[in-house]
Image (cartoon, grey):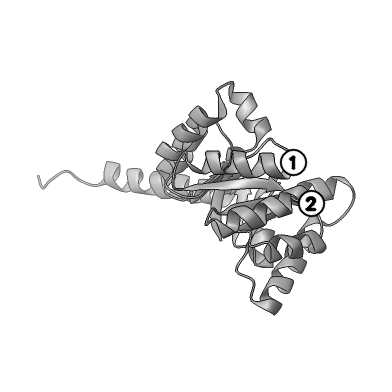
Amino acid sequence: MKFFLDTANLEELRKGAAWGVVDGVTTNPSLIAKEGVPMREQVAAICSIVNGPISAEVVATDFEGMVKEGREVAKIHPNIVVKCPLTRAGIQACSTLSKDGIPVNATLCFSPGQALLAAKAGAWCVSPFVGRLDDLGLEGMALIRDICRIYANYGFKTQVLAASLRSPLHVVQAAEAGAHIGTMPFKVLDQLFNHPLTDKGLDQFLKDYARAFQEAPTGRE
């Protein structure tokens, strides 16, 4: 499963990229607004840090506006994936942009039926939101499993991008469910490293090493 960072913060992206495990980035209007920098400028900066698919979302809500904006956003960098919401206008725009050779991330997916529409419209990927379904008392990960099974049934090329992953457990479950991509906040990626036995084991190794060499004779008398 590919790892994407769900952030527009350049410092977080630099840290994640330095580890060598980040394959791409997802952004949205909320994340861009949080950084206080114009979208085109911030997305261009992100593309200079991470060499992989970078999702940038349109803010228009009508078909013509989404297509126009999507074409402009795609010009920022060859790695741009245009995010369109899973609305009627969004799916129509997805179909048009996909036919133009522009990859589209069909976002805000909450049902298998919506995911089918995204695949039929030629989306590069679909983004089911796990955490937001969990908030409603539903099993968000079940949606990932359902979509993966449906796509496999018919050989759809659309990738499943598990979004709204809020914990390391979510990441592992998404991988087990067969998601092609998991996008997560930086803090979740960072938490994947953590395990008390790793820390304990490393501490013991270093103590044993230091003790052995500190106690070893330095030479013959």
Spot the residue most to the left.
Answer: 221
Picture layout, residue 6 above or below residue 205: above
Does the CB distance between marks 2 and 1 fall below 8 Å? Answer: no
User: Residue 89: image x %, image y %?
Assistant: 75, 48
Q: Secondary structure at mark 2?
A: helix
Q: Quadrant of residue 72?
A: top right
Q: How many residues crowd mark 1 within 10 Å: few (<14), some (14–19), many (20+)?
A: some
The type of residue carrying mark 2 is: Arg
Is 143 displayed left or right of 64 in the figure?
Answer: right
Quadrant location of the C terminus in the rendered image: top left
The dot on residue 35 is none
Residue 88 is marked as: 2
Residue 71, above or below 171: above
Q: Is residue 151 visible?
A: yes
User: Does residue 157 appear left or right of residue 52 in this picture?
Assistant: right
The first of marks 2 and 1 along the sequence is 1
Mark 1 secondary-structure assignment: loop
Q: Amino acid at mark 1?
A: Asp
Q: Is residue 191 visible?
A: no
| Residue depicted at 62% across the width and 58% down the height | 125
Query: Circle 1 sits on which residue?
Result: 62
Q: Nearer the viewer, residue 128 or 14?
A: 128
Tell me what residue is drawn at x 74 percent, y 66 percent: 147
At 51% from the left edge and 34% from the top edge, which residue is drawn? 43
Residue most extreme to the right:
137
Q: CA distance from mark 2 to mark 1?
A: 9 Å
Residue 11 x, y percent position in the rendering: 48, 30
